[in-house]
Image (tube, grey):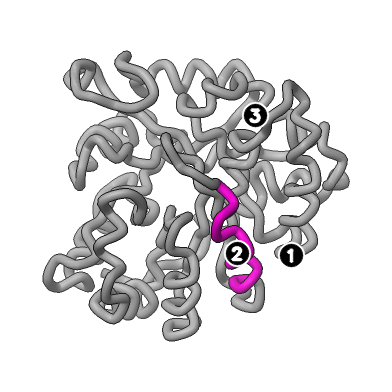
Amino acid sequence: MHGEVIDAHFHLWDVAFAGRPFPYTPDPFPLEAMVELMDAHGVARGLDVTPVMYGFDNSYGLEAAASAPGRVAVFGRFDPLAPDPAARLRAWMRRDGAAGVRLTFYAAELGKLDDPAALDPFWAAAEALGVRVSVFAPDALWEIVRAVERHPRLNLIVDHFGLGVYPGCPDPFANHAAVAEFAPFEQVLVKVSGVVEVSRERWPFPDVHALLAQAREQFGADRLIWGSNYPVVLETCDYEQSLRLFEECGAFDGAELAMVLGGTCARMLREPVAAP
């Protein structure tokens, strides 16, 4: 393996929510299962992205981070339209285990982007504080591009390479061309966590190798972050294949591979956030 490996995107949920509808599996996927998986594949640490079914309740992720200090941190779901986003961002980043926030805009959530200016207080607060904001908005990427143009120091992370990897998405590539518009903003990072899920071929998924090469060309390895999207990715591949794809695709040399599989994420997590 190449340096410290960090899984920047997985989802944890506990047994209390086993009966709640969730589009991928009815079974719980707790911290213990994820740590076992990471240990088996030489993954040093990782980021839990609060699943959509929890709403804005990030408590299980924080419990997981407290149970595995140094191994797991949390990108918590956050309401960007609620009052006083600066105070709420400060409060969140004071929590042990909090690493950033995650916004989702697809399906019913797209309504929040009807008036992009309504989100400007949130974008301005996140920009001023240096809080890392992970965004999944495959059907509204152009609106997010405009937000970064208005807030050029925003520490944005484009999830899943801008691909529509959600159940029922009619065209995962519909707005993918917008991803290139983030390239001039050097602080914007791209998570290549969803690429394997748009493949129509079996392992090693040769039809998406060009996508990974495109990501490298547009952003460079030092702005790309691997994440497994586990356990959602099980519909396409297992954990080892999600990790090994980046070796198999041939798009990255050894040093670049080390950046994508952990170095970029490690640097991001070291970057200071404004004092609360």
Amino acid under disc 3: Ser
Which quarter shows the C terminus?
bottom left
* Residue for point 50% across, 74% down: 145
> Which contiguous range is marked in magenta?
172-182
Earlier residue among tags 1 and 3: 1
* Residue for point 63% across, 64% down: 177
Q: Secondary structure at mark 1?
A: helix
Q: Are marks 2 and 1 in contact (CB under 8 Å)?
A: yes
Q: Secondary structure at mark 3?
A: helix
Up the image or down, 110 lies above or below 196; here it is below
Was residue 177 drawn as part of the magenta stretch in this picture?
yes
Q: Position of residue 117 (x, y in %)?
A: 29, 81
Amino acid under disc 2: Val
Label 1: which residue? 218
Label 2: which residue? 179
Q: Secondary structure at mark 2?
A: helix
Q: Position of residue 137 (x, y in %)?
A: 43, 57
Was residue 27 drawn as part of the magenta stretch in this picture?
no
* Residue for point 58% across, 67% down: 178
Q: Which of these two is toward me, 238 or 44?
A: 238
Q: Is residue 108 left or right of residue 101?
A: left
Amino acid under disc 1: Gln
Up the image or down, 173 lies above or below 114; here it is above
Earlier residue among tags 2 and 1: 2
Q: CA distance from mark 3 to mark 2?
A: 22 Å
Label 3: which residue? 242
Up the image or down, 3 lies above or below 30; here it is below
Which secondary structure class fits the magenta region best? helix
Q: Which of these two is toward me, 50 or 181?
A: 181
Q: How many numbered marks appear? A: 3
Q: Which of these two is toward me, 62 or 22?
A: 22
* Residue for point 57% across, 32% down: 44
